[in-house]
Amino acid sequence: MTPPARTIAIKQSISSISSFSRIGQYVAPLILAAVDYITVIFAVLTAWYLRTIILPEYFLMLHPFHVHNTYVYFIYPFTYFLFLSYEGMYTKRLPFWKNVEIIFKICIFVSTLAIVVMYFTGKAENISRAFVVFTWLFSFLYLISARHITKRILVATGLWKKPVVIVGAGKTAELLAKSFEDEPNLGYKIVGLVEDNHIECSLLNRYPHIGLFADVEQAVIDSGVQEVIIATPGLEREEMLDLVYRIQPYVRNLTIVPDLFGIPLSNMEVETLYNEKTVMLKARNNLSLFRNRFIKRVFDIVFGMIVFILILPILLGIYLIIQYDSKGSPLHTAKRLGKGGQEFSCYKFRTMHVGADSLLETYFAQNPEAKEEWDKFAKLKNGDPRVTHVGKFLRKYSLDELPQIINVLKGNMSLVGPRPYLPREKARMGYFANTILYTVPGITGLWQVSGRNEIAFEGRLQLDSWYVRNWSVWHDMVLLIKTINVVFGKKGAY
């Protein structure tokens, strides 16, 4: 295809996407609102039905419960609509787990408010606890599922797509493109890239190159988009300002990706000094607050006890298998860095032969390339001579780490947290150590769900530091759920 013909094809494609997007900005919220209305009603009716079939008939006769149609078809759905609208859930484009978090909180608020309304208006003769729990549960599950499926359909039809032009095609733009691909329900469609260095940018092999920085205004006008993202954090201040003032008159929304990678983002507050034309970003270290550490500890104790009871038969079974497979104690105790850099005894199932250190030194002497791999990842991907036959299986599914639940109950580890580092690794941790060692390490964490042993040592430090600064109970819950998928998928395990 010749350059002029290619340009015409690109413009036609952009025009088609933009047309559906313009219609979608009015139609999509209405469709989502209608889906929410039907979903909430269905959740309430499901809760009522289950309540009637689960409880014995004589109990229902003693404790009659009737839900008025006003509550089912008006009060409950309308209350949800108000909360969802307040959170911007009909216009915002959020990642899946952020959507889940917001809906989870809304379900709690609405269920509480509904009980109060029902009680004071006399719309329910008797408030059933089972009904309230079922209503909350099914509202949560149905809303997540229905909204996810609806957005998929809206994206497929083009009504939830939002065409964007990205200025820059370097590493930052690649991260954005990957995020848009991993989260299709965001609906962002990259229709073109503006970049000067078009030779070394691999991203230009996947998306159209529509212009250079020098003619960025014309490129944006020709594209017809109303969303532009400047993803060039390495630009000098004057160059960045120049781009902003040249692009802004031609678009509705201009987003700038600053060079703030690794900085804590949760609960970040923005303050503006208008006279000085200055923006201040207030970042917090979440686990530096006592209340957050207290909540995290309660979370560990409650869920730790539940997990310990559930896996106790598995622990005993693995203990006996290891004892039969190889010489030595089935349990292995290793020193790890805990809170404040204090060493503690970390419990694991033994996966190595007795005298593993001497085996490793011999292996390094015979395989120098393995020593380089060890220095980079602190792991050996292509076979570790120290690992037993049973140990390979345990490591593949992270079963060797199950005894660490004892560390969690003792308080020197957490269910979720930074990686438990070796004492000899403290010097390599550098300035990350102050942040990472501010809390106890975890059985799982951001490092595990992000690639586990495939991530270089420096990358693990960055992930662990980010986790500590951005901690929340919700993040811990999401990471625990993601860990199940990672473990059974055996991603990064060896």
Image: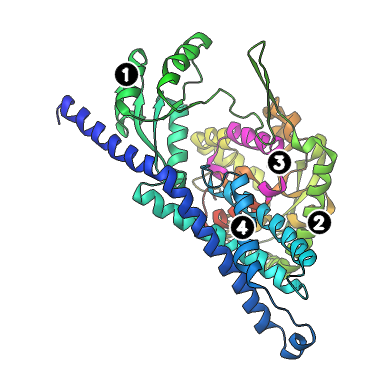
At horizontal 59% and vertical 25% (from top left) the residue drawn is: 260
Identify the residue position indicated by label 3 in the image.
Answer: 471
Q: Position of residue 317 (x, y in %)?
A: 68, 70
Q: Secondary structure at mark 2?
A: helix
Q: Is residue 321 visible?
A: no
Of discs 2 and 1, which sits in the foreground? 1
The kind of residue on which mark 2 rests is Ile
Identify the residue position indicated by label 1 in the image.
Answer: 218
- Say few, some or many: other residues with alpha carbon within 10 Å of mark 2 (under 14 / 14 to 19 / 20 or more): some
- Name which of mark 3 and mark 4 comes first in the sequence: 4
- Name which of mark 4 and mark 2 comes first in the sequence: 4
- Name which of mark 1 and mark 4 comes first in the sequence: 4
- Name which of mark 3 and mark 2 comes first in the sequence: 2
The answer to if 452 sits in the magenta stretch is yes
- Give the main secondary structure of the magenta stretch: helix
135 or 81, which is in the foreground? 81
Q: Secondary structure at mark 1?
A: helix
Please give the label number shown on residue 301: 2
